[in-house]
Image (tube, rainbow, N blue to C red):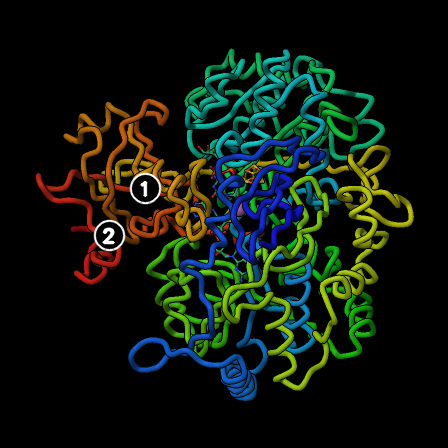
Amino acid sequence: MNSSHVSSICPYCGVGCGIELAVQNDRLISVAPQRSHPLSHGQLCAKGWSTAYGVDPAGRIHQPLLRNNDGFETVSWDRAIAEICAWLRRIGDEHGAAALGVISSARATNEDNYAAQKLARAVLKTNNIDHCARICHSPTVAGLQQTLGSGAMTNSIADVAHTDLILVIGADPTENHSVLGGQIMRAKLRGATLIVVDPRRTRLAKLADFHLQLKLGSNIALINALLADIIANNWHNREFIAQRCEGFEALAASLDGACEGIEAVTGVARDTIRAAARAYSGADRAMIMYGMGITQYVSGTHNVMALSNLALVCGQIGREGTGVNPLRGQNNVQGACDMGCLPNVYPGYQAVAETAVREKFSRGWRTEVPAAPGLTSLGMAKAAMQGDFRGLIIFGEDPVVTDPDQNHVREAFGKLDLLVVAELTMTETAKIADVVLPAASCAEKDGTFTNCERRVQRIRRALPPPGEAKADWRWLGEIARGLGSDQLDWANEEAIFDEMAVLTDSYSAMSYAKIDQHRGLQWPCNGEAPTGTAILHRKRFPIGRARLVPLTPSAIDEPADADYPLLLTTNRLHFHYGCGSMTRKSPLLERETPPGILFIHPRDAAALGVHQHAPVGVRSRRGYLETRAMLSEDVPPGLVSLPYHFREAPSNQLTNNAQDPLTKMPELKACAVAVRPLPAGQAPRDIDRLRGEGLVEASHANL
Ligand SMILES: Nc1nc2c(c(=O)[nH]1)N[C@H]1C(S)=C(S)[C@@H](COP(=O)(O)OP(=O)(O)OC[C@H]3O[C@@H](n4cnc5c(=O)[nH]c(N)nc54)[C@H](O)[C@@H]3O)O[C@H]1N2
Ligand SMILES: Nc1nc2c(c(=O)[nH]1)N[C@H]1C(S)=C(S)[C@@H](COP(=O)(O)OP(=O)(O)OC[C@H]3O[C@@H](n4cnc5c(=O)[nH]c(N)nc54)[C@H](O)[C@@H]3O)O[C@H]1N2
Ligand code: SF4
Ligand SMILES: [Mo]
């Protein structure tokens, strides 16, 4: 028997735990934690332990598929690539490069993502390149770039063990960054203060010293009130502000009256706000950790900047155990952003708008690169509706389940001349593609992932891909070649990494050998910091002084009203991940939850005549779904919550596509809905059945 153990990194969340793949006769038989991994120290959460199911050949796509009149036919790679290239040429000739685009994957490697943005820019000649960070932490990238000069986690996971206070706001780390969530629990148990700001009573909220159970979307009002209390009581850090910040006077003046009526606006008691302000500002070292409850709002960028104000005014940044720490979600979302899979920046956040940057990449790649600004992912869908955008290559994303307003997404994709989807399994998006390509999973390719604390780690090929599946950078290279370009002709992953490092200052002193030697390197890792950087902004900010910015609280886009009397928020569950296409292959994870749940407060349930586990219909102005009610006092009255992992009852049937004007982040965390019990004896119908019966269209929303 042929067996081996291969060290790699968990393919789910941004914590980046170390896994060990046990392979026998080219089959992945189990996954266990790396005992001595510097972050996870021999721990994994239920998803990491279940990785073998997520990548198992069962249910994987094994060969390229081409749409025909009856569905899909199996074709050779040559045929699939030839069809794709013919379409790309035709669309480019008739409608110009702006009608083409690529959506890349925060689940795939840095090397795959670098290849994707290079295909878009150097071969297709468009900046239409984006990925799921758009609907995740794009407000972080934009907001912290403006205030601090760098849009990434300022500190390291290891700091949790050395801090005095942790402020978790709009994040649920025991469920979603579970190994880190466990470390936060241990920090609390050793005596650190824990403040949780969340409209739901999360597991950490139950353990916290203060739970500020704010009303949905009232983040800026609450943070401004904290700041007002801090400044009024002289709890701010004058020395830090004088030496390292600008804009304090304007910020302080803008906070006049910030505490008036604050209890009504936020739902949080005045005394609790003051006590939390005192604790945060008075702590020797205090860390802010935040997530989707901050970013997924039309005010997302301003919400992030408000947190930056709070940390700066208290001098809680640039030291161990402090900082503004966005909990980046996907295993490689930090990397996909770093690689320039965003329409406005090249690798290393070098701006497309700057001529010198375009010249640099033009020289580096020996070809002209486009100057016109690119479209965001949701912008591509919008342009498709208008007929201006016609050919889209997507890999490692399932927007039909994960983008807001599902009926709109389906309609927009239906208008494309060409939709290519490269996937592990037949996702809902793959089902409506023209060409489906079989992608290799993380266990079947080499490369790197960059975790939430900017740590670049190696993943390793442990077994061959099933059937004819290929690493994403390889088929991206074949498309380039089919279009007559040798731009993506690399010998292996290391060659891609080395090319990227030459063009990207923050990665410039990294190599595969050095990453192995140091068990991961945190960027910036360059001439000034040859072994990487654990804590950003120690002495100065990349923009010199940090900027304090006055911010006005704003309302959510769609408040509850007589027709839609409840507010809906969407959340995650520990046992499932994203669209569920990988975790739902695991019998262990699948056992834990029914396919769809609506969390509802017992008081609201009683008023509606809904009992525990009763089938319910939920409608918004955009769509309709059916699921089962889970009575829970962890959501306050007036608020219901749906996890977004279940294709049968996808919360994005209901969500609102209203967007943050600065980043186009949709308001995935708040919209108005109506809930009603289904007639006795009627089980929830899944979304395909409801669509078949014509019940999901917006025109039925008022039924
Ligand atoms: N198990 C699991 N883990 C995951 C994922 C997964 O799908 N499953 N996905 C990964 C990804 S892509 C990401 S981005 C991360 C996301 O991780 P988190 O950011 O933790 O994600 P969510 O659970 O969507 O939202 C976090 C919290 O925001 C709260 N919230 C809603 N509105 C507000 C508000 O106005 N203010 C405040 N302060 N809080 C609010 C919600 O109640 C929820 O508890 O998780 C990653 N890890
Ligand atoms: N209502 C609501 N909607 C949300 C959110 C929310 O909180 N509420 N959160 C949003 C957030 S934060 C995010 S990040 C998005 C996530 O949205 P998506 O990125 O669409 O979600 P994932 O489930 O991570 O989908 C990734 C797909 O990648 C495939 N995959 C994994 N590895 C590889 C690989 O190496 N190559 C290829 N080609 N494919 C691979 C998997 O099979 C999976 O189907 O969802 C967003 N949507
Ligand atoms: S915490 Fe995240 S990285 Fe670690 S095992 Fe769980 S899903 Fe994987
Ligand atoms: Mo995310």
- Is 557 positioned to the left or the right of 290 in the image? left
Residue in view at x 86 percent, y 43 percent: 531
Residue in view at x 30 percent, y 44 percent: 595
Give the x, y percent position of residue 590: 36, 42
Residue in view at x 27 percent, y 27 percent: 631
Amino acid at the residue labelled 2: Asp
Give the x, y percent position of residue 344: 66, 61
Q: CA distance from mark 2 to mark 1?
A: 21 Å
- Is 291 positioned to the left or the right of 191 in the image? left
Asked if disc 2 and disc 1 are in contact, CB closer than 8 Å, the reply is: no
Judged from this view, the residue extending furthest toward the left is 680
* Residue 42 seen in the figure: yes
Q: Earlier in the sequence, mark 2 or mark 1?
A: 1
* Residue 95 seen in the figure: no
Q: Closest to the observer: 442 or 642? A: 442
Residue in view at x 74 percent, y 34 percent: 247
Examine the image and state in which quarter residue 368 appears: bottom right
Which secondary structure, mark 2? loop
Instruction: Identify residue for label 1.
Output: 672
Give the x, y percent position of residue 685: 20, 50
Instruction: Identify residue for label 2.
Output: 686
Judged from this view, the residue extending furthest toward the front is 1
